[in-house]
Structures are given as structure tokens and as C-alpha cells.
Amino acid sequence: MTTAAVQRPFINGDFVDLAPVATFPTHNPATGEVLADVQYCDEAVVDRAVAAAAQAQPTWAQLSGTERARRLRRVADELFARNDELARVESLDTGRPIAETRLVDVASGAECFEYFASVAATLVGEAVPLPGMLAYTERRPLGVCAGIGAWNYPLQIACWKAAPALACGNTVVFKPAELTPLTASVLAEIIIDAGLPPGVFNVVHGDAECGQALVAHPDVAKVSLTGEVGTGRAVMAAAAPTLKHVTLELGGKSPLVVFDDAALDDAVTGAMLGNFYSQGEICSNGTRVFVHRSVHDRFVEQLVARTAKLRLGDPLDPATHVGPLISTAHAAGVRAAIDAAVAEGATPAAGGAAVPAVAPPLQAEAYVQPTVFVDCVDHSRLVREEIFGPVMAVLAFDDEDEVVARANATPYGLAAGVFTRDVSRAHRVAGRLDAGVCWINTYNVTPIEVPFGGVKQSGIGRENGPAAIEHYTERKTVLADLGSLEDPWADD
């Protein structure tokens, strides 16, 4: 598959040419090459997309759950079949290594459609036994749902938002991130080819103005955003006047705790997965790595040795471990954060702010060396602020109560990790950590079958698993009296 010279919005089952209209480029982060020019969608275009979704929604919702399931499974099958070509486009647009996108991105999206197809076929209400009455509940779709994606996992995020919404009988207007717009359009084509009606899934492109028009639209019933905390606050405020349903999956500064009895090799692997996978551009990353003082030095020694073996290079090369960050501007910001950490007194045990030596046509300024800091302090910017790059802070601790208190001393609460062989301690600490997701002896594993989301300022609501249904349906209660209605004012 090749990307089109111009990316257009997808509305009511087809691409819509808005020319003449302003466009913005989407780049290959590795080389700076323009992959496509993307047409901006203003408020009028957003209104057109929402109108198409609103018109299509009743017909889609009236299909049986089994029929919706059948069509959603076709979407999953096509995603699986086109894994390699979609992974290539994802790597070109995001800069993430092809070894990752082939393994994770497309498959995760396909599994999401597969899972929620089964949910669509089994979506039921409840009967409530009451004396003399028939009482039952129905799950009703919300209507038009707006999805706003992030740039790090664009196809996966689009699927995570579309599949549960569609399974429940809603329709969707999706706005991919401005930096990574390409695969959403392919998903839209696949959805139509799978037999879903025109208007059920629509794609609009643009910057914050486009997103604001979508969130504020009076005919949008629900907004699901994946993004950073500031954007989440803005979306929540914009949704308030019409009391829209809101799901927010936001950022984090997650702790990963390594106890003295942990399998050290596994703990190092977990820390690397939680910091260097996808160039560290993952919201749930465990960037605060707390290591028991008795094993701290051995842990750091192994970590530094293994970090040195990570290969930076072309994302399309299967041997590449670390690709470019999403843009040269973002990479410059990450290097500035590394410099600031050094100025605060932290010591880089691996990596640093120097621009890596990668060969043209790769643009070296987009790359950041995987960096490990020691001698970190809890109140520093390095330890408190989300950097969203391959930067890890390692901190020593002495006992369980201390590390739990330090781990929870953050406004975020997306994820956490615990490495220990002590089963009791593993579950005890997991229960005490303020996080929506906690991994034990692993990290950053997100099966579709289980809920994903944060607490505190890391978000509201849950994606995936049965919990997602609560965020894409409303419960309607029906009560019927089975006898004659008693008149409370009747004469005795």
C-alpha cells in the first residue's frame, strides 16, 4: 500500500475532496520526507461528518447484535490480513520500528474488533424480580461518539475507540492526531468494505480547532480522548455545557518497583520495556524505577550493559530497536529535559543529550539515545514531569512503606509495576499503589480483554474489556405493573 499524495476526510462512506482548502504535511520522522498533504477540516466539515454519523446511527443500532458482530469480525479479519502493509505505513508515519508495529499495532487493533464483535452478539440487559411487577433494563447506545487519537499508536487507538462504540450500536467521528493521520483513513475503508453502512465511521483531520469543533458539537453524545493532561482538561470543560459522556486516557509518571528478591534479569527487561519500547513514547511507561538499595548497583550495571546494545536506525529495518521520536522538535525537547536533569544533579549512567550518529538519509536530530539516570531525587523535574522519550530515572529505596509512599507522591496514576518473587508482597503492594493498571513481574502488557485507564489526573473511564461497555451505553429501566393499579386516595 502506498500513501496518497493528499489525505482527505472520510465522510458518509467515501473520501470527500475539500479542494481548494488549506493542507498540512505529515512527515516521516526518520528522514523528514513528506508522506502526504492532509486537508484541514473546519467546523463546517466537522458538522457534515457528525450529520452523517447521526443519520446512520438509528439504522446501525437497529441491526441485531449478531449482525453487527458479523460485520465487525470482517473488519478484524481484514486487519489481520493486511498486517504487514499497515505496519509499514504506521512505521513510516510514527517512526516506530517495524519489528514493533508488525507485532503489536495492527494485531492489537484487529483483536479489539474481534473481541467487541463477540460483545455485540451478547449485549443484553437484566431482569429484576419484583413482586407484582416486571422490571428489566436495556443497554441503549449513546448516539454519535467522537474519538480523538494520539500520535504514538494511531491505528491501535482508532480501533480501541471505534470497536466498542460500534459494537454497542453507536456511530463514530474520529479525528486522528495531526502528526500521524494516515492509517485512520485505511481503517475507514476497511470498515465500509466489511459491510458497515456509510456514515457509521467517519474521519476528519486537523489541529486543535478541528478537535474543539468536534467536542463542542451539540449532536455528539460522547467524547473519548487519548492525549496529555492539559488537553484532557480542555476536552472535559468543552464537553460540560452539553453534559457529554467523557472518557479520558491521559499521561502518567508511572512507578516501577524492584524488590530485593526480584529476578533481576526480568526486572531489567521490564524496566527497558517500560522506558525504551517505542522510543519511550508510551503514556503508561514506568519512568520512575525504584530499586531496593541492596540490589541497586547490580541492577544498574545490567541495565547499562543491555541499554548499550540497543540499535538506533531506520524504522523499516527489522534489526532496529529504537527509531526516531515523532519530530525533531519533540526530540529537541527531550534532549533539553536530559540537560536539565544533569543540571539538577542527576548522573547519566547511559546515553545523554548528544545527538546520536545515524547515517543519512536519517535525520539525526530526530533521534535520542536511550538514557538512564542515577543519583536522582524525588522532587526533581526528571522524576516528577512526563518527558515522553527514552529517559529513565533509577532511584534507590529501603523498605516497602517508604517506596509505596514515594511511588504515590504524584498527581498521576495511570500504571505501575512490581517485580518480586514474594506472592503476598506482590499483591499487597499492587493493591496499595495508586494506579489504574498494575503489572506484576511484567510491564506494558495490554490485552484487549482487560480494562485499561488511569486514576487521579491520568484519566477518567476505561477502555477495553467489559468495562468499556459502560462508557458506550446507557441503561434504560422499564417497569410494568402486572396487576391493577391501586388508588391511594380511594375511600376506605
Image (cartoon, helix red, strand yellow):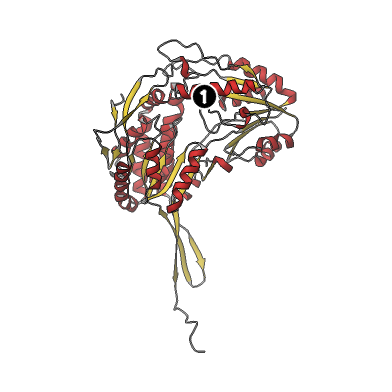
Location of residue 371 (image quadrant):
top right
- Residue 76 is situated, as x and y percent measured from the top left of the image, at 38, 36
In-image side of 465 versus 442 (left or right): left
Name the residue located 59 percent from the left edge and 30 percent from the top edge.
286
Number of residues whose C-alpha sits closer than 10 Å to that of mark 1, classed few (under 14), some (14–19) or many (20 or more): some
Q: Is residue 120 above or below residue 299?
A: below
As rendered, which of 333 and 394 lies closer to the eye?
333
Residue 112: % across, % down: 43, 38
Image position of 189 (left or right of 372)? left
Look at label 1 and name its amino acid.
Gly
Note whether 266 is above or below 478 in the view shown.
above
Q: Position of residue 16 (x, y in %)?
A: 25, 37
Q: Secondary structure at mark 1?
A: helix
Residue 374 falls left or right of residue 135: right
Q: Residue at x 46, y 51 (%)?
A: 240
Q: Which residue is at the front of the view, 280 or 477?
A: 280
Query: Which quadrant holds residue 212?
Result: top left
* Residue positioned 54% across, 17% down in the render: 369
Q: Residue extending furthest bottom?
A: 492
- Residue 466 visible to the viewer: no
| Residue annotated with mark 1 | 333
The percent coordinates of residue 175 (x first, y second) are 38, 38
Q: Quadrant of the N terminus?
A: top left
Q: Is residue 445 visible?
A: yes
- The mark tally for this picture is 1
